[in-house]
Every structure is written in C-alpha cells, then in structure tokens.
Image: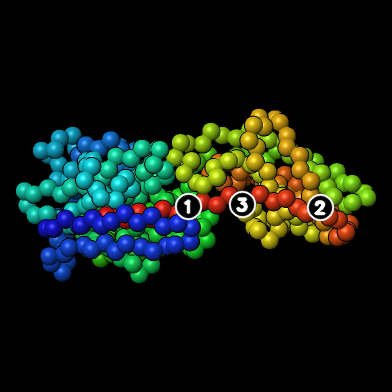
Amino acid sequence: MSRVRVLTLLTALLTAVALTVGVAATAEAAPRKWPHGRITYVDKSKDPDAVKLAVQIWNSSGLKIRFKKVRSVRKARLVIQNTKRVPSGCGSGYGTLGYPGPGRKAYVSILHGTDADGQGCAWPGQTLVVAHELGHVLGLDHTMSGCSLMNTSHTNGVAPSLCLGRNIDESKPGRWRCRVLEKVDLKRVRKIYGGTPKLRVPEWCDAIERIPATGAVVATQDPSSGWFTTTVTRAAEPAVPGWIGTWAYGEPGYEIHATPNACTAVPGDDSTQVGLGLWADVPVGGALTEDLPPLPAGPVCLSVWQFDRGYNFALAPSTVMVTGTGARTSSRTPDLPPRARGMVEVTPFD
Ligand SMILES: [Zn+2]
C-alpha cells in the first residue's frame, strides 16, 4: 500500500484559516483491514509521551482494535519513529495507509518536537499527530466534511483545524482538544473493525496548569472626577511550560471588566473590558495601580482576571462592587493597551 503523502507548511496569520489539502494516494478504493484489528508496534521515537497517549486513546476507544507494544522492530508490524524528512516541520508526519500485507511493516514517522517550537511541536500537538497517523494506519484517509482527527491540518497543536471556530482565542496555546477521536472518526473505524465506540469527555482540556485565583483588587473613587483608582495584587502563578511562549505579546497581566449590578463579565470580552495591566517587573505579592474613567451611574461590579503569558485566564476572578457616577466631563481618556493577540499556525498533519 502506498504511503500518505506530505504537503507544504502553511502558516496563517490572525484570522486566516486556509487549509492545505492532503492527498491520500490510495491505490485501492478501501485500504485493507488489519487481521483481528491487532497491530504490534515498536516505539523508536524520541516522543514516547505522545506515542503512549495516542495509543492509549485509540486502545480505549471501544473499537475492536488494539495497538500492542513490543520490544523489537523484528516483532513489530508497525514502527513508530522520528524522521527529519517531513516538509512541514514538527507537528506533521507520515503514516502508512491501512494494512500493508503479510510480512510487510507499516510506519508512522514524525519529526521530533521541541518546546521552543510551540504547542504544535510539544506533547499536545505531537499526540494529535501520532493519533492522526495511527488513524491512517488503521485505514482512514483524510476528511474535511467537519471536525475530525483526520482533518488535513491542525491549528497550533490545539485541535484539528475544523474543530475550531473562527474566534482566534479558541486556538491559543494552553487549550487542547483532548477528546482526540471525534464522532466521525469512531464511526469510520467501527465500520471497518466493529466495536462500541466511546466518546471521550471532556472535549476540551487545559494542557497547562491554570492560575487558580486572581489577586485582590481595591478600587477607590475620586468624588470630584468620578474616576477610580484600582490596585490589583499579583497572585502566585503556576510555572508555564516552555511551549506556551509562542502566543504573541506573551506578557502576564490582568484584565478589568465592568458590568452593571452584578459580576457577570466573562474574561476576554471586549465589550465589558475597561482596563488591562501587564505585570512586567511586579513580583508575586506586588501590586499595579491604574486609573479608570467614570463608570455608568449605579452599582457596578469590577471583575479582574489575571492571565499567564499564554493569555490563559485564572480560574477565578477577583471582584469589587463600586458605585458609578455616570459620565463626567473630563479631558482624560482611558488608556487601554492593545489586547493580547496571538498568531495562528496551521500545520498539515501530513
Ligand atoms: Zn494525514
């Protein structure tokens, strides 16, 4: 059977979500099925965590397939290995399509990834890539009819590209499509091998440890101008992995949101954001002060969320209720730094 071919790298900026199209060079209409759904494999790669997780996900899918680890290449029907010959760099690979026939081996080849290259090349992205290549080995070719592990590309190593919406924040490092096997993937493999497919829950996971809580916030009002001075204390933050640094701006800080009557703001929502601070040299336990313009008359909740250098928000905000005075004539204008905005990298699996 033929190898699935590899295509070119595509790096898309901001909202571009163009995709490359992978062509599975199928010599036959349907790839051959592995006898009894059993595939012995040997892992010769330097990405054992990704391989282990990808195998475990397929093996617990409820389908009548099993990847069984063996020690020697001689005993293995599938060899998982690193190669430098992937035109798309790390986060992409090759996989043999379907059962190669008696006495022949199947191969999964990926480029060894390093944290410096971002989430697509660290364990979350590599796990998606290995799982995708194993999908080819089982006999699946690409599909672009919806969210599928067998989409031709993934975005930032966060998810297969069609599993993401158009909001750029959905593809930021730290988020991960931990379901891995989508409904359509399970359905297609069941058609070949049988079994009772199980969808993994949850669909999405944090691939990093999130800041548990935001530091305290204090707001004092200048009665003559109606302006508020807010002071936010920096709470401790878990260390972030090296691969998180690919998100543009990459500075930890906090956002302040204002909502009338109750604390209903959602972090990242432009429509309620009134302030943003970057910690820069402020240590944990230190504080930043900034001025907010007058708020609408009546009770207003100020909600503050810390975020890490991947723009991942703390699990909990800090809030304070204040009383807005309504707009006052003032020559001062709010000084809002630009929102943290990232870069979307779309990488073909193969
Ligand atoms: Zn592929």
Q: In this view, does 324 lie above or below 28?
A: above
Distance in Å between CA atoms under marks 1 and 3:
13 Å
Q: How far apart are marks 2 and 3 (CA)?
A: 21 Å
> Could you tell me if the residues under marks 1 and 3 are in contact, i.e. CB atoms within 8 Å?
no
Label 2 is placed on what type of residue?
A: Arg
- Residue pointed to by mark 2: 332
Residue beneath the point at 39% across and 41% down = 117
Which residue carries the number 3 mark?
339
What residue do we see at 22% from left, 42% from top?
83
- Report the residue that reaches farthest toward the left: 103
**Other residues around mark 1 within 10 Å, as few (<14) / some (14–19) / many (≥20):** many
Question: How many residues crowd mark 2 within 10 Å: few (<14), some (14–19), many (20+)?
Answer: few
Identify the residue shown where x is 44% and y is 40%.
243
Amino acid under disc 3: Arg
Q: Nearer the viewer, residue 320 or 297?
A: 297
- At a point 44% along the width and 62% down the height, the residue shown is 16
Q: Nearer the viewer, mark 2 or mark 3?
A: 2
Picture disc at residue 71: none
| Label whose residue precedes the other's in the sequence (2 or 3) | 2
Q: Is residue 86 above or below residue 49?
A: below
Can residue 193 be seen here? The reply is no
SS assignment at label 2: loop
Q: Earlier in the sequence, mark 1 or mark 2?
A: 2
Res 343 label: 1
**How many discs mark residues in the rendered view?**
3
Helix, strand or loop at label 1? It is: loop
